[in-house]
Amino acid sequence: MTNTYGDWLRQQRETAGLTQQQLADMAVMTRSHIAHIEAGRRVPSREDARRLDLALNTGNVLSSFLPEEEAAVADYFEVALELEQQAVMIREFALSFVPGILQTAGYARSVLNTSFPRVSDEECDRRLVTRLERAKILDDPVTPAVWALLDEAVLRRQIGGPGVMAEQLKHLVQLGESGRIQVHVLPFELGEHPLLSNMLTLMWFEDQPPTAYAEGLHMGKIHDAPSVVQELQHRYDFALGNALPLRESLALLRATARDYERHD
């Protein structure tokens, strides 16, 4: 999404005499999400854009000018993508590969190329653009706060070859050293832990209850029942308590990246 899109939304809102909070209430969104869209840091989902058009009486202009790449996600991930863009805190657990918002272009392309049946190069490019757009939420230096809890298998599984892995791990190190994310590794020697069965994303928001998203092969599920979300939070906290501290995790990431570079 370009800044022009956000600027146009702001102009329409101001012309209508609405504050961000008033527009958010009318469009059934959060004020912070409106602010991020206007600043060019977030991309509205198609449902968001439809509700904004209705609230501002702008026909289907906001819906029509959304980038096509926004549709390049699995159906079951669409709601999670919208929530990801609104979250003020995100805690990721990854069992097999680096979470989407933390992936480099080379790593993301290699992951996307594992789809079955295989997609065309053009479709892969379209999905890659969408995945990299998601990572723009990290352009804001503060929000969302992001924690990444990685099973050691994420570091050891060679996706895309040694060069791609070295670049990816160094990217995680840079994000961790800059303070933009907290990254922790669950070492193999730990053995079993409460998150072995799924990828998990926990999300907190400015003005709505926390939500969890769990994903497996060809399936993903949003959990918003308070008891279920709390249980998943407890599982995450328990696993995190057994993970390597930030400094040791970054040291392991650096060492593993150097090993990949030596074999590249």
Image (spheres, rainbow, N blue to C red):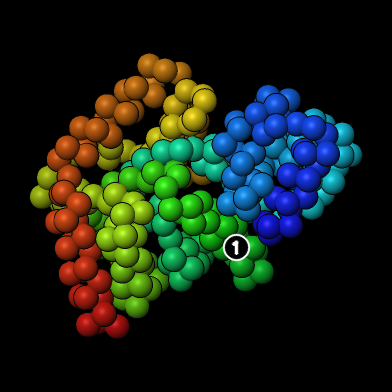
Q: x%, y% of residue 154?
A: 29, 57
Q: x%, y% of residue 196?
A: 27, 40
Q: Residue at x 43, y 35 (%)?
A: 203
* Residue 31, placed above or below residue 173: above
* Residue 112, placed above or below residue 34: below
* Residue 33, placed above or below residue 262: above
The residue beneath circle 1 is: 129
User: Residue 213 sits in which quadrant?
Assistant: top left
Residue 171 seen anywhere in this rendered image of the structure: yes
**Element type at mark 1:** helix
User: Residue 261 sits in which quadrant?
Assistant: bottom left
Q: x%, y% of residue 244?
A: 15, 49
Residue 100 seen anywhere in this rendered image of the structure: no
**Count of numbered circles on the image:** 1
Left or right of 2 in this view: 179 = left
Between 108 and 101, the one lying in front of the other is 101
Between 111 and 229, the one lying in front of the other is 229
Left or right of 4 in this view: 220 = left
Q: Residue at x 38, y 21 (%)?
A: 228
Q: Residue at x 60, y 62 (%)?
A: 129
How crowded pointer 1 is (Cα within 10 Å; few <14, some 14-19, many 20+) is rated as some
Q: x%, y% of residue 263?
A: 24, 82
Left or right of 42 in this view: 138 = left
**Amino acid found under the numbered disc labelled 1:** Val
Left or right of 55 in this view: 206 = left
Between 261 and 102, the one lying in front of the other is 102
